[in-house]
Image: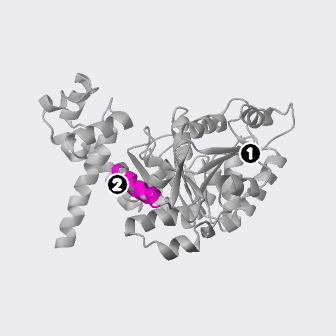
């Protein structure tokens, strides 16, 4: 009886979470603002008009749409669909929501996930490129995926023709979990030729989208898909790309999110090398020759030996301090955003723990909002 009651409550909460994404004129940033002011998705729908009018940036038409609550019947349909297909809805405040994506201001309020991979795994790499991949591009893509086997990564891409499909296929071949981010709902696969591969990905990886069922892969959905790819990774690899295209858009977004970007250089004059060569030339991507370049720039070669035995011997850490030190155990230097992401501490709490460690001579602050083990 208690279990059924819990399920009923969760289903009702989900109804309002999905409903919030459907309100015309709200959007992801506006929806998060509404949740912050009202106290939760359900509270948004329960709020009185006069209170909604006090929220900055929420206009009369949007308030009308909230008050009417016409979206909830469509949300009920979606709940029936995801329950039938064993799809997991992940709200941006949920524990299992991709933490890297959570820190992006324009991240989707809700994503739908079907798969087995941990979307908060320690190392996540994105691989994107042209749909018109050359033999050289496909060969390099497979080689770089194979070289990443020891690094225990998840490979993320967009399940498109060309380099995306090559990255997913190579990941399955070498037993690396791979997640495809879709520009449509989970009731279909586009391109359809990837349907068989997508089913294998669910077993070792998964499929992720912000779009509800019955959503077609329309042109305007792909840039939105690209921002999810860029947001949920640590670094992006661009294998081949023209001067204009989805891969370059993804690289630009990744740069705006302060993600590391790597590009594979190509022959001068080749159409699908122009994008990569351009990114390298303007210093928006590091030149990529092998996985060793990624390990070096990402600091993956620096293991827990960076924390000296003397430090561990003479300093007894609190539980919070130890959590921070464990993060430094994997990288000699860490940016404040990375520490906050991995520790999941609120900013005020994190500042206090870091200050204590700094006073104790354990870490030192560096330029660029970074810290380093002394």
Residue 296 placed where, x, y %? 71, 55
Residue 10 placed where, x, y %? 25, 59
Q: Residue at x 46, y 71 (%)?
A: 315
Quarter of the view holding residue 247: top right
Note whether 243 is above or below 315 in the view shown.
above
Range shown magenta: 348-360
Q: Secondary structure at mark 2?
A: helix
Q: Secondary structure at mark 1?
A: loop
Task: Work out whether residue 154 or residue 17 is closer to the camera in this orientation and state it.
Answer: 154
Residue 262 placed where, x, y %? 70, 45
Quarter of the view holding residue 82: bottom left
Task: Work out whether residue 231 or residue 110 is closer to the camera in this orientation and state it.
Answer: 231
| Type of secondary structure dominating the magenta stretch | helix
Query: Looking at the image, which residue sits at the far bottom?
Result: 313
Which residue lies under the disc numbered 2? 349
**Residue 240 is one of the magenta-drawn residues:** no
Note whether 160 is above or below 374 in the view shown.
above
184 to the left or right of 82: right
Q: Earlier in the sequence, mark 2 or mark 1?
A: 1
Quarter of the view holding residue 279: top right
Task: Work out whether residue 203 or residue 355 is closer to the camera in this orientation and state it.
Answer: 355
Q: Residue at x 42, y 70 (%)?
A: 317
Q: Is residue 71 visible to the viewer in this orientation of the structure?
A: no
Residue 302 placed where, x, y %? 65, 63
Q: Nearer the viewer, mark 2 or mark 1?
A: 2
Q: Residue 239 — which label?
A: 1
Q: Quadrant of the N terminus?
A: bottom left
């Amino acid at each position: 009886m208690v279990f059924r009651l819990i399920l009923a409550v969760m289903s009702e909460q989900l109804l309002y979470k999905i409903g919030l994404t459907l309100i015309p004129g709200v959007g992801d940033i506006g929806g998060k603002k509404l949740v912050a002011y009202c106290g939760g998705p359900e509270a948004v729908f329960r709020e009185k008009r006069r209170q909604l009018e006090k929220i900055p940036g929420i206009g009369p038409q949007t308030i009308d749409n909230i008050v009417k609550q016409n979206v909830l019947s469509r949300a009920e349909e979606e709940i029936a669909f995801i329950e039938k297909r064993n799809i997991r809805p992940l709200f941006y405040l949920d524990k299992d929501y991709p933490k890297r994506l959570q820190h992006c201001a324009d991240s989707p309020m809700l994503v739908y996930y079907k798969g087995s991979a941990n979307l908060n795994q320690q190392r996540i790499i994105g691989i994107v490129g042209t749909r018109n991949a050359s033999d050289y591009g496909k060969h390099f893509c497979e080689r770089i995926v194979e070289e990443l086997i020891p690094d225990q990564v998840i490979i993320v891409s967009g399940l498109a023709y060309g380099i995306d499909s090559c990255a997913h296929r190579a990941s399955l071949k070498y037993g690396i979990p791979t997640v495809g981010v879709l520009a449509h709902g989970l009731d279909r696969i586009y391109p359809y030729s990837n349907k068989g591969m997508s089913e294998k990905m669910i077993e070792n990886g998964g499929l992720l989208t912000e779009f509800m069922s019955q959503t077609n892969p329309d042109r305007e959905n792909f840039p939105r898909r690209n921002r999810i790819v860029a947001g949920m990774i640590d670094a992006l690899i661009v294998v081949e790309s023209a001067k204009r295209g989805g891969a370059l858009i993804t690289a630009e977004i990744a740069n705006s999110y302060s993600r590391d970007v790597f590009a594979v250089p190509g022959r001068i004059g080749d159409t699908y090398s122009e994008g990569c060569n351009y990114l390298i030339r303007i210093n928006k991507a590091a030149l990529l020759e092998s996985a060793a370049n990624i390990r070096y720039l990402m600091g993956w070669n620096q293991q827990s030996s960076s924390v000296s035995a003397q430090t561990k011997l003479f300093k007894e850490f609190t539980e919070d301090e130890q959590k921070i030190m464990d993060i430094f155990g994997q990288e000699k230097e860490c940016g404040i955003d990375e520490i906050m992401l991995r520790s999941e501490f609120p900013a005020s709490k994190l500042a206090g723990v870091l200050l204590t460690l700094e006073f104790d001579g354990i870490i030192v602050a560096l330029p660029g909002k970074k810290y380093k083990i002394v």
